Image (spheres, helix red, strand yellow):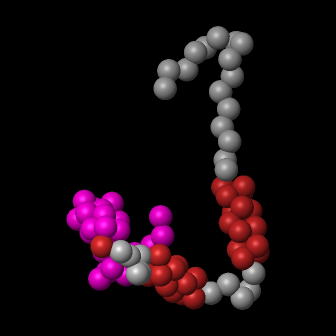
Amino acid sequence: MIHDRNPDHHDFEIDLTRDEVRRRAAVLGALGDDWDPVAVLEGEQEAYRLLYSNLDARQQQTYDRLVAAGVLPGREGEGHAAA
């Protein structure tokens, strides 16, 4: 970065470390002590399974095409994270 030596412009730096620590603490505080990330992931996987269950033939064909194109993860992997 080229610094202009113009007296009307001043360089300054901001350290966001303290704000990031505060933000992360607030997130964890909002989640609460009973938050269970494993249960949340299992719930997301169950919702994904239900979303793509009982498809008619045309819907299944579209789903298969999207999986083949890499747009959707396949069901066999079911270890995917929600996007």
- Residue 67 spot, x, y in % from top left: 28, 67
> Image quarter for residue 19?
bottom right
- Residue 21 spot, x, y in % from top left: 69, 63
Residue 36 within the magenta-colored segment of the rendering = no
Instruction: Please name whichever residue, 41 or 21, is drawn nearer the observer in this view of the structure.
Output: 41
Q: How many marks?
A: 0
- Residue 55 spot, x, y in % from top left: 38, 76
Image: 34 above or below 80 = below
Instruction: Please name whichever residue, 6 or 26, is drawn nearer the observer in this view of the structure.
Output: 26
> Image quarter for residue 58?
bottom left
Q: Left or right: where does residue 3 sit relative to residue 65?
A: right
Residue 79 in sight from this viewpoint = no
Residue 14 in sight from this viewpoint = yes
- Residue 36 spot, x, y in % from top left: 62, 87
- Please give the name of the residue rendered at 33% of the width and 79% of the height, measured from the top-left corner: 75
Image: 71 above or below 43 = above
Question: Magenta segment range?
Answer: 58-83
Q: Left or right: where does residue 80 sit relative to residue 62?
A: right
Q: Left or right: where does residue 7 sit relative to residue 45?
A: right
- Please give the name of the residue rendered at 31% of the width and 64% of the height, measured from the top-left corner: 62
> Image quarter for residue 28?
bottom right
- Please give the name of the residue rendered at 35% of the width and 74% of the height, measured from the top-left corner: 56
Residue 68 within the magenta-colored segment of the rendering = yes
- Please give the name of the residue rendered at 55% of the width and 84% of the height, measured from the top-left corner: 43
